[in-house]
Amino acid sequence: MTDLARASAPATGGPRKDKKVREEPDAAQILRLGQILGRSSGGLPVLLLLAFTLTLTTDSFLTGTNLDNLGRQVSIYAILAIAQLLVILTAGIDLSVGSVAGLAGVIAAKTVFETSGGLPVLLSVLLALLVGAAAGLVNGLLVAVLKMPPFIVTLGMMGIARGATLLLTGGRTVQPLPEGFSALAGGTLLGISNLTWLMLLITALFALLLRRTVWGEYVYAVGSSSESARLTGVPVRHVLISAYTLSGLLAAAAGVLLASRLGNGVPTAGNGYELQAIAACVIGGASLFGAKGSALGALVGALVVGLLNNGGTLLGIDPFWLQIMIGALILAAVAAEHMKNLRRGGTGRRLKAAEGTAQ
C-alpha cells in the first residue's frame, strides 16, 4: 500500500470522522433559574409560600372575584414599583412617586369632571401623564445637573405634589366622573381586567428595555459606578434624567388608573404608596445601592405586598400587623443582601491572599 493510500485509509478501531462528537455544555452556557428570572427569584419563595398558605387557610382566595380584586390592587403597586425601580437601579431613590400619582389622578379626574364640561378622556389622561413626566424631569435635572441628593430632591417634590393636589381639590373628592374614564380601569378583556393587562404590558416593556437595550445597560452601569460609567463614555446625565422622567411618567399612569378604578379623584390617593413601591422593589431582589434588580422582580415584590394585604383582609388580620410584616420582609431582604455581600467580600480577600502566597 502506498503512502497516499495509507493516509486516506481510516485507522482501524479509531473514531469515525463522519460521526459528530457530542460535547458537554460549558457551565457558563447552562441557564439557571435565577438567570431566566433575572433578579426576581429571591422573592419567588415568599410569593409561593404566601399563595400556598392562603389557599389552605381560606375558602375564598382562589375564587374568581377575589383573584380579580387582587389583580386590580396589585396592578397599581406593580406600576409604581417599576417606576421606583428605574431610579433605584441608578443608586437613587424617588420618594415622590405616591404623591405624583395622587396629583396626576386628581388632574385627570378634575379635567373630565362631568358636571363642569371637562376635557375628553384622552386629553385628560395625556395632560396628567405630562404633569407626571414634568415632575420626574425636574427631579432628574436637580439630581443630574445640580448634583443634589435624590432623597432631598424627591422629598421636596413629594411635598410639592401633595400640596398641589390638596390645593386643586380644596381637600374635597372630585366626583362623579364619566363612565368613559372609569372604563379605563374598570373594563375587561378576555375576562381579565384592563388593569392586569396594562400591568403585564408595562412589566414586559420595561423588562425588555432594561435587559435588551443600550439604555438599559447604561442604567445598570450608572448604578454600579457613575464615575466609571462616565469614563467609559456613558452619558450619565442623560441616563439619570431619563430614569427620573420615566419614573414620574409611570407614577402618573398609576395615579390615573387608580382614579379610574376608584371612580373619583381622591386628594389623599397615593399616600404612603412610595413605601409600598420601595418594599416591592427590595422584596423582589433590587438593591438600594443600585445596579441590581429587574422589572419582573418588581412585579414579584408587588405581588407579595398585594398578597399580604389581600390575605390579611380575608383572614381578618389587623392591618397594623400587616405593616409590621411588610417592614420585617424589607429588613430580611436587605439583611440577606448585606450578608451575601459580606461573604463575597470575604471570599475575595481569601483569594487575593492565596494568590499572594503562591507568588
Image (cartoon, helix red, strand yellow):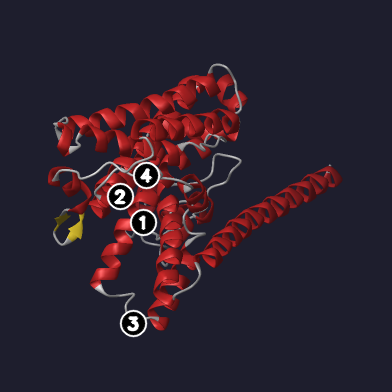
- Secondary structure at badge 2 equals helix
Q: Which of marks 3 and 2 is nearer the N terminus?
A: 3
Mark whose residue sits in front, 3 or 2 = 3
Q: Earlier in the sequence, mark 1 or mark 2?
A: 1
Residue 332: x and y in percent read 62, 60
Q: In which quarter of the image is residue 119?
A: top left
Give the residue type at disc 1: Val
- Read off the residue under disc 1: 74
- Secondary structure at badge 3 equals loop
Say few, some or many: other residues with alpha carbon within 10 Å of mark 2 (under 14 / 14 to 19 / 20 or more): many
Mark whose residue sits in front, 4 or 2 = 2
Give the residue type at disc 4: Ala
Give the residue type at disc 3: Asp
- Quick one: which residue is furthest to the right in this view? 357
- Read off the residue under disc 4: 207
Residue 325: x and y in percent read 56, 64
Q: Alpha-carbon distance for marks 3 and 4? A: 35 Å
Residue 359: x and y in percent read 84, 42
Look at 63% across and 57% down and name the residue there: 331
